[in-house]
Amino acid sequence: MIKPISGFSKLSKEEKINFLVDVYLGKSESTRSLIQGFWHNNTEDQKVFDEFSENTISNFYFPYGVVPNMMINQKLLCVPMVIEESSVVAACSKAAKFWLNRGGFNAKVISTTKNGQVHFIWKGDSDKLKSFFESVKEELINSVSPLVKNMEARGGGLLDIKLIDRTSDEPDYYQLWGDFETCDAMGANFINTILEALGNSFTDLVKANSEFQGEEKDLQVIMAILSNYTPECVVEAWVECPIEELQDPASDMSSQEFIEKFSRAIRISKIDVNRATTHNKGIFNGIDAVILATGNDFRAIEACGHTWASRHGKYQGLTDVTVNDGKFRFSLKLPLSLGTVGGLTALHPLARTSLEMLGHPNAKELMEVSACIGLAQNFAALRSLVTTGIQKGHMKMHLMNILNHLEANDEERKKAKLNFSTETISYQAVRDFINSLRQYH
Ligand code: MEV
């Protein structure tokens, strides 16, 4: 039986691998070589990766791809994407090309305010707390001024604090709500630092006030943390063109029929939660891949996006379509809290390269690019779904994965590609085909 290990994090990387190989990986020397084979040749670079996280033993590679011809606000960009799923980059590239001749993508940042809360309990008199808060608000803000100085110099800072009474939801529960502008930083560390300081200052001010003598214990800070839900940090992306221009020469579907099916697909994403989830998953296929490529936090973006998708009390698809005066308009509006300075953006060599490829965008421009890629992804997915179906394109890309899995040689790959240019691709069909080639030999 395997016993728990203590002090694992204190072991060197080699010692950690020794432990894993001995205890969990069948003492396999080839697995040890595999793990070490993914180390960076340059030990200094590897050290950077090792220090991103704890208990690092190696690197786990994901494909780093690009979408060329992405016209955004009249600027032609090549957008980097990190994603393992076949067809996503191809789908975005297809949508980029489609809209290139129809005015390209447009995007506009609507707001950039982020927020966080000091969640606390106050068992005393509610009105007394509220008037006390108003009387010390200025002092509270001043108490964190040394911490916001640098951010203020960049044009940001703590914008406001409010006292929120949540006692109707949970007994004695209040929040100190902070609004923040973090400029080109995602700002999580900045916001959390300020919130913790505000929580401490508020506690100190209550303790020091003679009116609260004997009531100090009625105040208890539960936690201080930013919110990843940022409905005031929002961007909109859209494409538009005259209806006739939607006609695809490769398809026998009229533009009118296409729009009807497309609009119906959007409506279905608003009324059916099963479809809405997949619809939005496709949007995040695109957005997450840009977020990863630029060293941003895709978990924060996903969590926020799904909450936003539920803001009307029901989980819904994130994109919208309108047809007015002969014009088709397709749009995506969502909160995206991103940074182009700080965090991994400067540390990860390929994140740096991604930002350089995008022309060193500021955070607002990166919000615009990410939203456009999400929109492109959704357009490509819906276009396939309501015309040819998704599997044709997807399985063509997947054929490579199946052939890799079957360790097909060059000759077998050539024959398989030819055969499956007309045949339906499935794992079983490809395996049978390769087996038949091998048997024949
Ligand atoms: C696959 O990863 C994403 C799609 O299912 C999205 C969609 O259905 O809209 C193709």
Image (cartoon, rainbow, N blue to C red):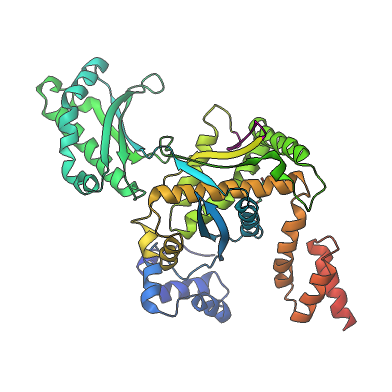
x and y, in percent, of residue 186 in the image: 37, 49
Q: Is residue 221 magenta?
A: no
Picture quadrant of residue 204: top left
Residue lying furthest bottom? 441
Q: Nearer the viewer, residue 147 or 293?
A: 293
Q: Nearer the viewer, residue 180 or 333?
A: 333
Task: Say left or right for 340 vs 66.
Answer: left
360 relative position to 224: left or right: right
Q: x%, y% of residue 100? A: 60, 53
Location of residue 43 (image quadrant)? bottom left
Residue 317 located left or right of residue 389: left
Residue positioned 31% across, 39% down in the render:
180
Q: Quadrant of the C terminus?
A: bottom right
Residue 293: give x, y in percent of width and height.
48, 60
Would residue 355 be seen by someone viewing this image from the given angle? yes
Range of the magenta residues? 316-326
- Quadrant (top left, top right, bottom left, bottom right) of the N terminus: bottom right
Q: Assess whether residue 318 is covered by the magenta stretch.
A: yes
Closest to the observer, 261 or 246: 246
Q: Residue at x 35, y 40 (%)?
A: 226
Q: In the picture provided, is 6 more to the left or to the right than 271?
A: left
Residue 12 visible in the snapshot:
no
Query: What residue is rendered at 43% in x and 63% in y?
Result: 351
Instruction: Tell me: residue 312, above or below residue 328.
Output: above
Q: Is residue 283 above or below residue 140?
A: below
